[in-house]
Amino acid sequence: MTIFLRGTIVFFISTLCCFVTAADRYAIRLEKSIMIPMRDGVHLSTDLYFPDGAKGPLPTVLIRTVYNKNGTLEWNKVYKELVQNGYVLAIQDIRGRYESEGDYVVASKRREDGNDTLDWLVAQSWSNQKVGTAGCSYLGETQVVMAATNHPNHTAAIPMSAASGYYAPGRAWQSFSGGVFELAQTAGWFASNGSQVFYGPPAHVDRSQWFRSPAAQLFQMAPSVDFPAYLKLLPTLPTATLLDRAHTPPTEYKQWATNAPHGEFFRSKDLAKANDPFNVPALFFDNWYDYGPSITLEMFQKFQDNASSDRAKENQFLVIGPGTHCDFKESTADFFVGERNLGNASLNYAEIQMRWYDYWLKGDKNALATIPKVQYYLMGKNEWRSSEQWPPENTDYQAWYLNSKGNAQSRLGDGELSRVKPKTDKSNTFVYDPAKPVPSLGGHTCCTGSDTEAGGYDQSDIELRKDVLVFSSQMLTAGIEVTGSLKAVLYVSSSAVDTDFTMKLVDVYPDGRAFNVQEGAMRMRYRESLADATFMTPGNIYKIEVDLNATSNYFPKGHRIRIEISSSNFPRWERNLNTGGKNYAETEMVKANNTIYHSRQYPSRIVLPVIASIRE
């Protein structure tokens, strides 16, 4: 998922249009709004960009978008370069969106429509029978879903930030974390991009001709949305009717907000799944401050484990940078992700993409000679690393234990984090008041409309709150690389029958700045099953595992490793109102006394994937 709050895009008026390009490259010729038929009679509008004068047969790269194909050519400089270098580029509005016919339902009929589009493309006289796919976010997820169909002409894929296309139980479309609804991200996307209503010509008019006409340039296909008005309503209750109160166009939002994280509604969505076969070489891109690096890592592995051929099994590649959603900057001396300076993170993303397509679609056997299987950016050390496997070699999963004398409330308390198991029988209790939730600041989301929705930000002020438990290591005497998937094991209790526990991994700099690295949550009613609720008995102690996604972060000598624990991170995550009722439909709330235990009997801890070979 992603959000594009763009102004009106004025595009091409005629069927054919040319760009002025460098003398040694092809000019670009556009055949606009070709209506490609699907098996059920629905037609999907597709723009075809041709290298003018190139002799066929030609390779094709397909982009299927939910965000309006008009203007998509500008989103990635590689798209123009592909056409200028002899590729046909096909950009298609998916079913029910903008110029295409049909009804729009999120994650529906994508396998059939993708296959039918591929069939049409390779049947054209100019095709060399090889089709690659491209695009980020929703454009990336259409690729991984298409990959699950094993179409014989789907020759290469570059899914970028495509975690929302893969079904991990309880994390459908990245709309939940540990059973907690991703409120700001999901509501923000539906408010700005989820409309099921689009305006077009009358039924008797030829859509293809009309969308190529001058009149179409003055026509607004999507309804207007007052997004600032929606943002003002975001803190209000109930959650389920948020977009109704904001008067946005009809969307599926209410179904997403009211169904169980692993319920039938989500299980039935057309997403790539863990048991799907895959038979396409794929080059995955993602970022550590995006919402789904752990899912991208899982897809990278599943595309190998479930490969239908040795060709696919041996040709899965991965690049994970330091940025936020679809933020792949080529070069910068100081790459700020939020407020965190992560050094010179330059990488020639465009060259890597072009080499991938040249290898698979044009047969350039030297194009991939120097590309490692895995490239990842080690934040804190601020350098690119490579590996031929994942997890990297020498990964040591280390338990770091929580400890205190019972006064870990805020960073001014006595919370400690160390490799030593607790020797005392202590616990820490804080009051979680849903009316005064811990505010979100940075992190791992998109689409919220906030200027601080993602990235690293100093959490020092938040850590002064009494409803935030803080556990810090001693100042490190040697640097530690933490690269891979993260989880925590906590022993908890509550005075409520249902509540949430939230957690952050934080890098504390010598000057006291505390930058968030990763985060996770658990809604207690879903601790046993993400499909069915099981409520707590107040006062009983429960063992839970909190998934904190994945990262690659170097904690240098002189830094501290810190854990924050609370019960809210709002508005990223929907507040738990603590009543045990239908949280999405309620407006009443109660306070909860929530407790974290750390003792010999209840050794709460975080498990860090430490790369043993890194030393400072």
Image: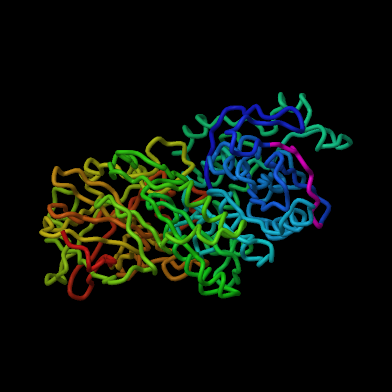
Asked if one can make out residue 178 in the rendered structure from this viewpoint, the answer is no
**Is the stretch drawn in magenta largely helix, strand or loop?**
strand
- Magenta stretch? 29-39
Q: Quadrant of residue 406?
A: bottom left
Q: Residue at x 53, y 72 (%)?
A: 313
Q: Check the image and name the residue furthest to the right.
A: 204
Q: Where residue 580 appears, x then y in whole percent? A: 44, 58
Q: Say if 280 sits above or below 80 in the image.
A: below
Query: In the image, 517: left or right of 237?
Result: left
Q: Does the magenta stretch include residue 32?
A: yes
Q: In which quarter of the image is residue 606?
A: bottom left
In this view, the residue in front, 87 or 459, is 87
Q: Check the image and name the residue furthest to the front.
A: 24
Q: Say if 326 sits above or below 144 in the image.
A: above
Q: Where residue 192 appears, x then y in whole percent? A: 57, 37
In this view, the residue in front, 492 or 153, is 153
Q: Say if 388 sits above or below 242 in the image.
A: below
